[in-house]
Protein backbone atom coordinates (compact mmCIF):
# COMPACT_ATOMS: atom_id res chain seq x y z
CA UNK A 1 0.00 0.00 0.00
CA UNK A 2 1.28 3.45 -0.92
CA UNK A 3 0.15 6.38 1.12
CA UNK A 4 0.20 10.14 0.75
CA UNK A 5 2.81 10.25 3.50
CA UNK A 6 5.21 8.25 1.34
CA UNK A 7 4.72 10.45 -1.69
CA UNK A 8 5.59 13.71 0.16
CA UNK A 9 9.13 13.05 -0.79
CA UNK A 10 12.32 14.94 -1.34
CA UNK A 11 13.20 14.14 -4.95
CA UNK A 12 16.72 15.59 -4.87
CA UNK A 13 18.59 12.52 -3.53
CA UNK A 14 16.52 10.21 -5.71
CA UNK A 15 17.33 12.19 -8.84
CA UNK A 16 20.99 12.13 -7.86
CA UNK A 17 20.78 8.33 -7.76
CA UNK A 18 19.12 8.25 -11.18
CA UNK A 19 21.85 10.52 -12.54
CA UNK A 20 24.52 8.24 -11.10
CA UNK A 21 23.06 5.44 -13.25
CA UNK A 22 22.31 7.41 -16.43
CA UNK A 23 24.27 10.65 -16.31
CA UNK A 24 22.51 14.00 -16.27
CA UNK A 25 21.33 13.66 -19.89
CA UNK A 26 19.36 10.54 -19.07
CA UNK A 27 17.13 12.27 -16.54
CA UNK A 28 14.39 14.74 -17.50
CA UNK A 29 12.99 16.84 -14.70
CA UNK A 30 12.26 20.35 -16.00
CA UNK A 31 8.54 21.06 -15.96
CA UNK A 32 8.41 22.27 -19.57
CA UNK A 33 10.24 19.13 -20.79
CA UNK A 34 7.96 16.83 -18.81
CA UNK A 35 4.91 18.12 -20.74
CA UNK A 36 5.88 15.81 -23.65
CA UNK A 37 5.21 12.83 -21.41
CA UNK A 38 1.98 13.85 -19.72
CA UNK A 39 -0.28 11.72 -21.93
CA UNK A 40 -0.23 8.94 -24.50
CA UNK A 41 -2.53 8.64 -27.55
CA UNK A 42 -5.54 9.10 -25.26
CA UNK A 43 -4.95 12.81 -25.07
CA UNK A 44 -8.01 13.72 -23.04
CA UNK A 45 -6.27 12.49 -19.85
CA UNK A 46 -3.12 14.23 -18.73
CA UNK A 47 -0.82 14.01 -15.73
CA UNK A 48 2.78 15.15 -15.56
CA UNK A 49 5.23 12.60 -14.09
CA UNK A 50 7.68 13.74 -11.38
CA UNK A 51 10.66 12.65 -13.43
CA UNK A 52 11.44 10.85 -16.69
CA UNK A 53 14.42 8.50 -17.06
CA UNK A 54 15.91 7.30 -20.33
CA UNK A 55 17.89 4.05 -19.90
CA UNK A 56 19.86 2.36 -22.68
CA UNK A 57 20.45 -1.13 -21.24
CA UNK A 58 18.72 -3.85 -19.23
CA UNK A 59 21.15 -3.30 -16.34
CA UNK A 60 20.27 0.40 -16.21
CA UNK A 61 16.55 -0.41 -16.16
CA UNK A 62 17.18 -2.85 -13.31
CA UNK A 63 19.11 -0.25 -11.31
CA UNK A 64 16.40 2.40 -11.85
CA UNK A 65 13.66 -0.02 -10.80
CA UNK A 66 15.67 -1.00 -7.69
CA UNK A 67 15.83 2.66 -6.70
CA UNK A 68 12.06 2.98 -7.20
CA UNK A 69 11.54 -0.19 -5.15
CA UNK A 70 13.76 1.08 -2.32
CA UNK A 71 11.90 4.40 -2.09
CA UNK A 72 8.47 2.84 -2.89
CA UNK A 73 8.07 5.07 -5.94
CA UNK A 74 5.52 4.00 -8.56
CA UNK A 75 7.00 3.69 -12.05
CA UNK A 76 5.44 3.45 -15.46
CA UNK A 77 7.07 2.12 -18.63
CA UNK A 78 6.60 4.09 -21.80
CA UNK A 79 7.57 3.20 -25.36
CA UNK A 80 6.47 5.61 -28.09
CA UNK A 81 3.37 6.82 -26.24
CA UNK A 82 0.90 5.88 -29.00
CA UNK A 83 -1.30 3.75 -26.73
CA UNK A 84 -4.99 4.60 -26.97
CA UNK A 85 -6.21 3.45 -23.56
CA UNK A 86 -4.02 5.57 -21.27
CA UNK A 87 -1.66 2.68 -20.43
CA UNK A 88 1.38 4.96 -20.29
CA UNK A 89 -0.57 7.78 -18.59
CA UNK A 90 1.55 8.91 -15.62
CA UNK A 91 0.16 9.21 -12.15
CA UNK A 92 1.15 12.01 -9.81
CA UNK A 93 4.66 11.65 -8.34
CA UNK A 94 5.63 8.72 -10.51
CA UNK A 95 8.78 7.96 -12.47
CA UNK A 96 8.30 7.37 -16.18
CA UNK A 97 10.81 4.87 -17.59
CA UNK A 98 10.96 5.64 -21.30
CA UNK A 99 12.55 3.13 -23.67
CA UNK A 100 13.14 5.45 -26.61
CA UNK A 101 16.95 5.11 -26.30
CA UNK A 102 16.73 1.31 -26.22
CA UNK A 103 16.53 0.96 -29.99
CA UNK A 104 19.06 -1.69 -30.92
CA UNK A 105 18.30 -4.75 -33.00
CA UNK A 106 20.49 -7.14 -31.01
CA UNK A 107 20.56 -10.16 -33.32
CA UNK A 108 19.04 -11.51 -36.52
CA UNK A 109 18.90 -15.27 -37.05
CA UNK A 110 17.25 -15.91 -40.40
CA UNK A 111 17.84 -19.69 -40.38
CA UNK A 112 15.85 -20.03 -37.16
CA UNK A 113 13.45 -17.21 -38.06
CA UNK A 114 14.03 -15.00 -35.04
CA UNK A 115 15.15 -11.51 -34.21
CA UNK A 116 16.12 -10.17 -30.78
CA UNK A 117 15.37 -6.49 -30.16
CA UNK A 118 15.46 -3.90 -27.42
CA UNK A 119 11.98 -2.68 -26.44
CA UNK A 120 12.22 0.80 -27.99
CA UNK A 121 12.72 -0.62 -31.50
CA UNK A 122 9.96 0.62 -33.81
CA UNK A 123 7.64 -2.11 -35.09
CA UNK A 124 8.29 -1.38 -38.75
CA UNK A 125 12.08 -1.60 -38.37
CA UNK A 126 11.88 -5.35 -37.79
CA UNK A 127 10.34 -6.01 -41.20
CA UNK A 128 12.66 -3.45 -42.80
CA UNK A 129 15.64 -5.31 -41.36
CA UNK A 130 14.68 -8.74 -42.72
CA UNK A 131 12.59 -7.99 -45.82
CA UNK A 132 15.60 -8.05 -48.13
CA UNK A 133 16.03 -11.73 -47.23
CA UNK A 134 12.34 -12.45 -47.87
CA UNK A 135 11.07 -12.33 -44.27
CA UNK A 136 8.71 -10.10 -42.32
CA UNK A 137 7.30 -9.51 -38.84
CA UNK A 138 3.56 -10.16 -39.03
CA UNK A 139 1.86 -8.00 -36.32
CA UNK A 140 1.39 -4.64 -38.02
CA UNK A 141 -0.58 -2.09 -36.00
CA UNK A 142 -1.60 0.93 -38.09
CA UNK A 143 0.78 2.89 -35.86
CA UNK A 144 3.68 0.64 -36.92
CA UNK A 145 5.88 3.45 -38.19
CA UNK A 146 6.07 4.89 -34.68
CA UNK A 147 4.97 2.41 -31.98
CA UNK A 148 7.59 0.37 -30.13
CA UNK A 149 7.91 -3.40 -29.85
CA UNK A 150 7.89 -3.02 -26.03
CA UNK A 151 4.53 -1.23 -26.25
CA UNK A 152 3.25 -3.91 -28.67
CA UNK A 153 4.24 -6.63 -26.20
CA UNK A 154 2.58 -4.84 -23.28
CA UNK A 155 -0.65 -4.26 -25.23
CA UNK A 156 -0.57 -7.56 -27.15
CA UNK A 157 -1.11 -5.42 -30.21
CA UNK A 158 -2.91 -6.51 -33.31
CA UNK A 159 -3.05 -5.14 -36.82
CA UNK A 160 -4.33 -5.68 -40.31
CA UNK A 161 -2.49 -8.99 -40.78
CA UNK A 162 -3.43 -10.53 -37.44
CA UNK A 163 -6.58 -12.19 -38.81
CA UNK A 164 -4.55 -14.97 -40.41
CA UNK A 165 -1.26 -14.80 -38.49
CA UNK A 166 -2.29 -13.93 -34.94
CA UNK A 167 -1.54 -11.01 -32.64
CA UNK A 168 1.74 -10.14 -30.88
CA UNK A 169 1.56 -13.01 -28.38
CA UNK A 170 1.81 -15.48 -31.27
CA UNK A 171 5.10 -13.93 -32.37
CA UNK A 172 7.00 -13.50 -29.09
CA UNK A 173 9.23 -16.46 -28.25
CA UNK A 174 10.95 -15.08 -25.17
CA UNK A 175 11.57 -12.01 -23.06
CA UNK A 176 14.16 -10.57 -20.74
CA UNK A 177 12.22 -8.62 -18.14
CA UNK A 178 13.01 -6.48 -15.14
CA UNK A 179 10.54 -7.37 -12.40
CA UNK A 180 9.21 -4.63 -10.09
CA UNK A 181 11.89 -5.39 -7.47
CA UNK A 182 14.65 -4.87 -10.04
CA UNK A 183 15.50 -8.52 -10.75
CA UNK A 184 16.45 -9.47 -14.30
CA UNK A 185 14.56 -12.59 -15.39
CA UNK A 186 14.46 -14.55 -18.66
CA UNK A 187 11.11 -16.04 -19.61
CA UNK A 188 10.23 -18.11 -22.66
CA UNK A 189 13.27 -18.68 -24.86
CA UNK A 190 14.60 -19.03 -28.36
CA UNK A 191 12.21 -21.79 -29.38
CA UNK A 192 8.42 -22.04 -29.18
CA UNK A 193 6.62 -24.10 -26.54
CA UNK A 194 9.15 -24.01 -23.69
CA UNK A 195 8.36 -26.30 -20.73
CA UNK A 196 7.02 -24.91 -17.45
CA UNK A 197 4.47 -22.16 -16.95
CA UNK A 198 3.84 -19.95 -19.96
CA UNK A 199 5.12 -16.77 -18.31
CA UNK A 200 5.66 -15.16 -21.71
CA UNK A 201 1.94 -15.59 -22.36
CA UNK A 202 1.17 -13.94 -19.02
CA UNK A 203 3.55 -11.03 -19.58
CA UNK A 204 2.38 -10.25 -23.12
CA UNK A 205 -0.70 -8.06 -22.74
CA UNK A 206 -0.02 -7.22 -19.09
CA UNK A 207 0.21 -3.50 -19.91
CA UNK A 208 3.35 -2.77 -17.93
CA UNK A 209 1.88 -4.02 -14.64
CA UNK A 210 4.23 -7.01 -14.22
CA UNK A 211 7.56 -5.33 -15.02
CA UNK A 212 9.49 -3.94 -17.95
CA UNK A 213 10.48 -5.94 -21.04
CA UNK A 214 14.08 -5.09 -21.95
CA UNK A 215 14.87 -7.69 -24.64
CA UNK A 216 12.33 -9.36 -26.87
CA UNK A 217 12.85 -12.43 -29.07
CA UNK A 218 10.46 -12.20 -32.02
CA UNK A 219 9.42 -14.82 -34.54
CA UNK A 220 9.67 -13.69 -38.16
CA UNK A 221 7.87 -15.28 -41.09
CA UNK A 222 8.80 -16.02 -44.69
CA UNK A 223 7.05 -13.64 -47.09
CA UNK A 224 4.27 -15.23 -49.13
CA UNK A 225 4.94 -16.27 -52.72
CA UNK A 226 2.02 -14.25 -53.97
CA UNK A 227 -0.15 -11.44 -52.53
CA UNK A 228 -3.24 -9.81 -53.95
CA UNK A 229 -5.40 -7.01 -52.50
CA UNK A 230 -9.04 -6.59 -53.50
CA UNK A 231 -11.10 -3.50 -52.88
CA UNK A 232 -14.87 -4.05 -53.04
CA UNK A 233 -17.28 -1.14 -52.70
CA UNK A 234 -20.83 -1.43 -51.42
CA UNK A 235 -23.96 0.69 -51.17
CA UNK A 236 -24.93 -0.77 -47.79
CA UNK A 237 -22.94 -1.59 -44.67
CA UNK A 238 -24.97 -4.78 -44.29
CA UNK A 239 -23.83 -6.08 -47.70
CA UNK A 240 -20.18 -5.46 -46.81
CA UNK A 241 -20.66 -7.12 -43.41
CA UNK A 242 -22.41 -10.15 -44.98
CA UNK A 243 -19.48 -10.53 -47.36
CA UNK A 244 -17.05 -10.68 -44.42
CA UNK A 245 -18.97 -13.57 -42.84
CA UNK A 246 -19.43 -15.34 -46.17
CA UNK A 247 -15.73 -15.17 -47.05
CA UNK A 248 -14.70 -16.78 -43.75
CA UNK A 249 -17.55 -19.33 -43.95
CA UNK A 250 -16.25 -20.31 -47.39
CA UNK A 251 -13.05 -21.45 -45.67
CA UNK A 252 -10.92 -18.56 -46.89
CA UNK A 253 -8.74 -16.85 -44.27
CA UNK A 254 -7.49 -13.64 -45.84
CA UNK A 255 -4.21 -12.12 -44.66
CA UNK A 256 -6.30 -9.11 -43.69
CA UNK A 257 -9.91 -7.98 -44.14
CA UNK A 258 -10.74 -4.39 -43.25
CA UNK A 259 -13.88 -2.29 -43.55
CA UNK A 260 -14.27 1.48 -43.79
CA UNK A 261 -17.52 3.44 -43.83
CA UNK A 262 -18.42 6.50 -45.91
CA UNK A 263 -17.20 9.03 -43.33
CA UNK A 264 -13.78 7.35 -43.13
CA UNK A 265 -13.52 6.94 -46.91
CA UNK A 266 -14.04 10.65 -47.47
CA UNK A 267 -11.74 11.65 -44.61
CA UNK A 268 -8.96 9.52 -46.09
CA UNK A 269 -9.49 10.79 -49.65
CA UNK A 270 -9.42 14.40 -48.38
CA UNK A 271 -6.15 13.85 -46.55
CA UNK A 272 -4.07 11.27 -48.43
CA UNK A 273 -5.93 11.23 -51.80
CA UNK A 274 -5.48 7.57 -52.72
CA UNK A 275 -7.99 8.19 -55.53
CA UNK A 276 -8.86 4.51 -55.13
CA UNK A 277 -11.71 4.67 -52.60
CA UNK A 278 -15.05 5.64 -54.20
CA UNK A 279 -16.36 8.64 -52.26
CA UNK A 280 -20.02 7.66 -52.77
CA UNK A 281 -19.60 4.11 -51.39
CA UNK A 282 -21.42 3.43 -48.12
CA UNK A 283 -18.67 0.99 -47.18
CA UNK A 284 -15.57 -0.57 -48.69
CA UNK A 285 -13.87 -3.85 -47.92
CA UNK A 286 -10.14 -4.33 -48.37
CA UNK A 287 -9.27 -8.02 -48.58
CA UNK A 288 -5.68 -9.22 -48.80
CA UNK A 289 -5.12 -12.78 -49.97
CA UNK A 290 -1.69 -14.36 -49.70
CA UNK A 291 -0.10 -17.77 -50.18
CA UNK A 292 1.01 -19.88 -53.11
CA UNK A 293 0.25 -18.36 -56.51
CA UNK A 294 -2.31 -20.99 -57.43
CA UNK A 295 -4.08 -20.62 -54.07
CA UNK A 296 -4.18 -16.82 -54.35
CA UNK A 297 -5.60 -16.97 -57.87
CA UNK A 298 -8.40 -19.32 -56.77
CA UNK A 299 -9.26 -17.41 -53.58
CA UNK A 300 -9.21 -14.05 -55.37
CA UNK A 301 -11.86 -15.37 -57.75
CA UNK A 302 -14.00 -16.72 -54.90
CA UNK A 303 -13.76 -13.53 -52.81
CA UNK A 304 -14.79 -11.43 -55.80
CA UNK A 305 -17.76 -13.72 -56.47
CA UNK A 306 -18.92 -13.54 -52.84
CA UNK A 307 -18.71 -9.74 -52.77
CA UNK A 308 -20.56 -9.41 -56.10
CA UNK A 309 -23.25 -11.85 -54.94
CA UNK A 310 -23.78 -9.64 -51.87
CA UNK A 311 -24.18 -6.53 -54.05
CA UNK A 312 -20.69 -5.06 -54.45
CA UNK A 313 -20.71 -2.42 -57.20
CA UNK A 314 -17.07 -2.78 -58.22
CA UNK A 315 -14.04 -4.86 -57.42
CA UNK A 316 -10.54 -3.52 -57.94
CA UNK A 317 -7.55 -5.81 -57.44
CA UNK A 318 -3.82 -5.30 -57.27
CA UNK A 319 -0.92 -7.74 -57.16
CA UNK A 320 2.05 -5.44 -57.68
CA UNK A 321 3.60 -3.94 -54.55
CA UNK A 322 3.12 -0.29 -55.51
CA UNK A 323 -0.62 -0.56 -56.16
CA UNK A 324 -1.14 -2.78 -53.11
CA UNK A 325 0.52 -0.18 -50.90
CA UNK A 326 -1.67 2.50 -52.50
CA UNK A 327 -4.81 0.51 -51.66
CA UNK A 328 -3.64 0.06 -48.05
CA UNK A 329 -2.39 3.63 -47.65
CA UNK A 330 -5.84 5.05 -46.95
CA UNK A 331 -6.67 2.40 -44.35
CA UNK A 332 -3.36 2.90 -42.58
CA UNK A 333 -3.93 6.67 -42.49
CA UNK A 334 -7.56 6.47 -41.37
CA UNK A 335 -7.07 7.47 -37.71
CA UNK A 336 -4.86 10.38 -38.65
CA UNK A 337 -7.33 11.47 -41.32
CA UNK A 338 -10.15 11.47 -38.76
CA UNK A 339 -8.24 14.28 -37.05
CA UNK A 340 -9.31 16.52 -39.95
CA UNK A 341 -13.00 15.85 -39.41
CA UNK A 342 -13.37 17.42 -35.98
CA UNK A 343 -11.17 19.08 -33.35
CA UNK A 344 -11.08 15.84 -31.34
CA UNK A 345 -12.05 12.21 -31.64
CA UNK A 346 -12.33 9.33 -29.22
CA UNK A 347 -11.42 5.86 -30.54
CA UNK A 348 -13.22 2.93 -29.08
CA UNK A 349 -11.95 -0.65 -29.44
CA UNK A 350 -14.34 -3.56 -28.98
CA UNK A 351 -14.78 -7.02 -30.43
CA UNK A 352 -17.92 -8.73 -31.62
CA UNK A 353 -18.68 -12.03 -33.34
CA UNK A 354 -18.44 -11.35 -37.11
CA UNK A 355 -22.03 -12.41 -37.67
CA UNK A 356 -23.21 -9.53 -35.44
CA UNK A 357 -21.56 -6.86 -37.60
CA UNK A 358 -24.72 -5.63 -39.38
CA UNK A 359 -26.70 -5.41 -36.11
CA UNK A 360 -23.95 -3.74 -34.10
CA UNK A 361 -23.17 -1.18 -36.82
CA UNK A 362 -26.88 -0.27 -36.93
CA UNK A 363 -26.91 0.14 -33.15
CA UNK A 364 -23.79 2.34 -33.30
CA UNK A 365 -25.55 4.53 -35.87
CA UNK A 366 -28.56 4.72 -33.50
CA UNK A 367 -26.23 5.86 -30.67
CA UNK A 368 -24.71 8.46 -32.99
CA UNK A 369 -28.21 9.84 -33.70
CA UNK A 370 -29.29 9.67 -30.05
CA UNK A 371 -26.25 11.51 -28.66
CA UNK A 372 -25.73 13.81 -31.66
CA UNK A 373 -22.10 12.86 -32.42
CA UNK A 374 -20.92 11.63 -35.81
CA UNK A 375 -19.20 8.24 -35.58
CA UNK A 376 -16.77 7.03 -38.24
CA UNK A 377 -16.14 3.29 -38.50
CA UNK A 378 -12.88 1.79 -39.69
CA UNK A 379 -11.98 -1.62 -38.43
CA UNK A 380 -10.50 -5.11 -38.62
CA UNK A 381 -13.70 -6.66 -39.99
CA UNK A 382 -12.35 -10.20 -40.28
CA UNK A 383 -11.66 -10.30 -36.53
CA UNK A 384 -14.88 -8.45 -35.65
CA UNK A 385 -12.60 -5.84 -34.03
CA UNK A 386 -14.47 -2.53 -34.20
CA UNK A 387 -12.89 0.92 -33.99
CA UNK A 388 -15.70 3.49 -33.87
CA UNK A 389 -14.22 7.00 -33.92
CA UNK A 390 -16.53 9.38 -32.11
CA UNK A 391 -16.03 12.92 -33.45
CA UNK A 392 -16.36 15.83 -31.02
CA UNK A 393 -15.00 19.13 -29.78
CA UNK A 394 -13.33 18.87 -26.39
CA UNK A 395 -13.55 22.62 -25.85
CA UNK A 396 -17.34 22.27 -25.51
CA UNK A 397 -18.23 21.98 -21.83
CA UNK A 398 -19.31 18.44 -20.94
CA UNK A 399 -18.62 17.01 -24.41
CA UNK A 400 -15.90 14.59 -23.25
CA UNK A 401 -18.13 13.06 -20.56
CA UNK A 402 -20.92 12.56 -23.12
CA UNK A 403 -18.58 11.02 -25.64
CA UNK A 404 -17.22 8.65 -23.00
CA UNK A 405 -20.81 7.67 -22.27
CA UNK A 406 -21.31 6.83 -25.96
CA UNK A 407 -18.04 4.84 -25.90
CA UNK A 408 -19.26 2.97 -22.81
CA UNK A 409 -22.60 2.15 -24.51
CA UNK A 410 -20.68 0.72 -27.46
CA UNK A 411 -18.57 -1.49 -25.20
CA UNK A 412 -21.66 -2.75 -23.37
CA UNK A 413 -23.21 -3.54 -26.73
CA UNK A 414 -20.10 -5.55 -27.68
CA UNK A 415 -20.35 -7.56 -24.45
CA UNK A 416 -24.12 -8.05 -24.92
CA UNK A 417 -23.61 -9.74 -28.31
CA UNK A 418 -20.90 -12.03 -26.94
CA UNK A 419 -17.82 -9.91 -27.66
CA UNK A 420 -15.17 -8.09 -25.66
CA UNK A 421 -14.33 -4.60 -24.38
CA UNK A 422 -10.92 -4.61 -26.05
CA UNK A 423 -9.49 -6.15 -29.19
CA UNK A 424 -6.01 -4.69 -29.19
CA UNK A 425 -5.73 -1.29 -27.51
CA UNK A 426 -5.71 -2.66 -23.96
CA UNK A 427 -7.67 -1.60 -20.91
CA UNK A 428 -5.27 0.95 -19.43
CA UNK A 429 -6.81 3.76 -17.46
CA UNK A 430 -9.65 4.24 -19.90
CA UNK A 431 -11.63 1.02 -19.77
CA UNK A 432 -10.93 -0.49 -16.37
CA UNK A 433 -14.40 0.40 -15.14
CA UNK A 434 -15.91 -1.89 -17.81
CA UNK A 435 -13.94 -4.96 -16.66
CA UNK A 436 -16.80 -6.08 -14.36
CA UNK A 437 -19.09 -6.11 -17.42
CA UNK A 438 -16.93 -8.94 -18.78
CA UNK A 439 -15.46 -10.66 -15.75
CA UNK A 440 -16.88 -11.88 -12.45
CA UNK A 441 -15.40 -10.72 -9.14
CA UNK A 442 -13.52 -13.99 -8.72
CA UNK A 443 -12.16 -13.77 -12.31
CA UNK A 444 -10.79 -10.31 -11.55
CA UNK A 445 -9.41 -11.41 -8.21
CA UNK A 446 -7.56 -14.30 -9.86
CA UNK A 447 -5.93 -11.87 -12.30
CA UNK A 448 -4.93 -9.63 -9.37
CA UNK A 449 -3.23 -12.59 -7.65
CA UNK A 450 -0.98 -12.89 -10.67
CA UNK A 451 -0.27 -9.19 -10.53
CA UNK A 452 0.55 -9.34 -6.86
CA UNK A 453 3.03 -12.18 -7.32
CA UNK A 454 5.05 -10.11 -9.80
CA UNK A 455 4.31 -6.72 -8.29
CA UNK A 456 3.68 -7.08 -4.53
CA UNK A 457 4.34 -3.40 -3.72
CA UNK A 458 2.00 -2.32 -6.50
CA UNK A 459 4.66 -0.05 -7.98
CA UNK A 460 4.54 -1.11 -11.65
CA UNK A 461 1.92 0.93 -13.52
CA UNK A 462 -0.56 1.29 -10.64
CA UNK A 463 -4.19 2.12 -11.22
CA UNK A 464 -4.37 0.45 -14.64
CA UNK A 465 -6.46 -2.48 -15.95
CA UNK A 466 -8.40 -3.22 -12.76
CA UNK A 467 -11.51 -1.33 -11.72
CA UNK A 468 -11.57 0.91 -8.70
CA UNK A 469 -14.82 2.00 -7.07
CA UNK A 470 -14.80 5.09 -9.29
CA UNK A 471 -16.94 5.60 -12.32
CA UNK A 472 -15.68 5.82 -15.87
CA UNK A 473 -14.29 8.97 -17.40
CA UNK A 474 -12.34 9.93 -14.33
CA UNK A 475 -9.03 8.34 -15.18
CA UNK A 476 -6.80 11.39 -14.80
CA UNK A 477 -8.33 12.71 -11.59
CA UNK A 478 -8.71 9.18 -10.27
CA UNK A 479 -5.00 8.65 -10.76
CA UNK A 480 -4.35 11.69 -8.60
CA UNK A 481 -6.84 10.74 -5.90
CA UNK A 482 -5.51 7.24 -5.82
CA UNK A 483 -2.32 8.54 -4.34
CA UNK A 484 -4.02 10.54 -1.69
CA UNK A 485 -3.88 7.95 1.01
CA UNK A 486 -5.74 5.01 -0.49
CA UNK A 487 -4.72 1.62 -1.77
CA UNK A 488 -3.49 1.45 -5.33
CA UNK A 489 -5.16 -1.83 -6.10
C1 LIG B 1 -2.90 6.20 -35.24
C2 LIG B 1 -2.87 4.98 -34.35
C3 LIG B 1 -3.18 3.75 -34.89
C4 LIG B 1 -3.14 2.61 -34.07
N1 LIG B 1 -3.42 1.38 -34.62
C5 LIG B 1 -3.33 0.28 -33.86
C6 LIG B 1 -3.59 -1.02 -34.42
O1 LIG B 1 -3.88 -1.18 -35.62
N2 LIG B 1 -3.49 -2.10 -33.60
C7 LIG B 1 -3.15 -1.96 -32.28
O2 LIG B 1 -3.08 -2.98 -31.59
N3 LIG B 1 -2.91 -0.76 -31.72
C8 LIG B 1 -2.97 0.36 -32.47
N4 LIG B 1 -2.72 1.58 -31.91
C9 LIG B 1 -2.40 1.66 -30.47
C10 LIG B 1 -0.89 1.67 -30.12
O3 LIG B 1 -0.10 2.10 -31.20
C11 LIG B 1 -0.45 0.30 -29.64
O4 LIG B 1 -1.10 -0.02 -28.44
C12 LIG B 1 1.07 0.17 -29.44
O5 LIG B 1 1.42 -1.15 -29.13
C13 LIG B 1 1.60 1.07 -28.32
O6 LIG B 1 3.02 1.10 -28.43
P1 LIG B 1 3.84 2.30 -27.78
O7 LIG B 1 5.26 2.03 -27.99
O8 LIG B 1 3.34 3.59 -28.27
O9 LIG B 1 3.46 2.08 -26.25
P2 LIG B 1 3.07 3.14 -25.12
O10 LIG B 1 1.85 3.88 -25.51
O11 LIG B 1 4.26 3.93 -24.77
O12 LIG B 1 2.73 2.16 -23.93
C14 LIG B 1 1.64 1.27 -24.01
C15 LIG B 1 1.64 0.36 -22.78
O13 LIG B 1 2.78 -0.45 -22.81
C16 LIG B 1 3.52 -0.34 -21.59
N5 LIG B 1 4.92 -0.50 -21.99
C17 LIG B 1 5.62 0.20 -22.91
N6 LIG B 1 6.85 -0.28 -23.06
C18 LIG B 1 6.95 -1.33 -22.19
C19 LIG B 1 7.99 -2.25 -21.86
N7 LIG B 1 9.17 -2.21 -22.45
N8 LIG B 1 7.73 -3.18 -20.93
C20 LIG B 1 6.54 -3.26 -20.31
N9 LIG B 1 5.52 -2.41 -20.57
C21 LIG B 1 5.73 -1.47 -21.51
C22 LIG B 1 3.14 1.02 -21.05
O14 LIG B 1 3.30 1.07 -19.65
C23 LIG B 1 1.69 1.10 -21.46
O15 LIG B 1 0.88 0.41 -20.54
C24 LIG B 1 -2.79 2.73 -32.69
C25 LIG B 1 -2.47 3.99 -32.16
C26 LIG B 1 -2.51 5.10 -32.97
C27 LIG B 1 -2.17 6.43 -32.37
Image (spheres, rainbow, N blue to C red):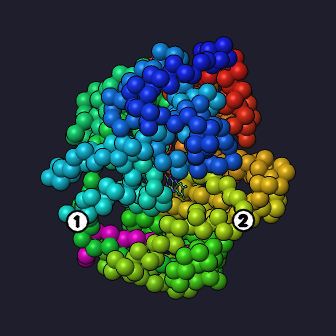
Q: Is residue 138 left or right of residue 111?
A: right
Q: Quadrant of residue 135?
A: bottom left
Residue 451 covered by magenta stretch: no
Vertical placement of 329 versus 423: above or below? below
| Mark 1 surroundings within 10 Å by alpha-carbon count, few (fewer than 14), some (14 through 19), many (20 or more) | few
Name the secondary structure under disc 2: loop
Q: Is residue 179 left or right of residue 437?
A: left
Where does the magenta region start and end?
284-294
Q: What residue is drawn where x is 67% and y is 54%?
A: 346
| Mark 2 surroundings within 10 Å by alpha-carbon count, few (fewer than 14), some (14 through 19), many (20 or more) | few
Q: Quadrant of residue 484?
A: top right
Q: Outermost residue, right direction?
A: 397
Camera sees residue 86: no
| Residue under pointer 1 | 132
State whether the magenta stretch is mostly helix, strand or loop.
Answer: strand
Q: What residue is drawn where x is 59% and y is 75%?
A: 271
Whole-percent x and y of residue 46?
A: 66, 42
Mark identifier at residue 106: none
Instruction: Quarter of the image for the N terminus: give it.
Output: top right
Q: What residue is drawn where x is 66% and y is 72%?
A: 263
Of residues 318 and 353, the one drawn nearer to the viewer in this rendering: 318
Instruction: State whether label 1 is within 8 Å of ligand 1.
Output: no
Whole-percent x and y of residue 368?
A: 76, 61
Amino acid sequence: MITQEKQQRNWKPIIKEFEAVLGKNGVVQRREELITYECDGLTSYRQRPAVVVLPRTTEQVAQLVKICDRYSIPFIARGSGTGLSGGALPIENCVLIVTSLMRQILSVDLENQRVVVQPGVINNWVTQTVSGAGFYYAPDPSSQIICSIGGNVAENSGGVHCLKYGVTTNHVLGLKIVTPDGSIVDIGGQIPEMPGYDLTGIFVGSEGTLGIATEITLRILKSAESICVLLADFTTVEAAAESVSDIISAGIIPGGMEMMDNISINAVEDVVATNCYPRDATAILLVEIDGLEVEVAANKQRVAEICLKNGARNITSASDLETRLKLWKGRKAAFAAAGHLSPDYYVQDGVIPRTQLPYVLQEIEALSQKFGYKIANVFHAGDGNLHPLILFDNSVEGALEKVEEVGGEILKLCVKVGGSISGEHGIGADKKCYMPDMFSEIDLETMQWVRQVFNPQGLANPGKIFPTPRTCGEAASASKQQFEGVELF
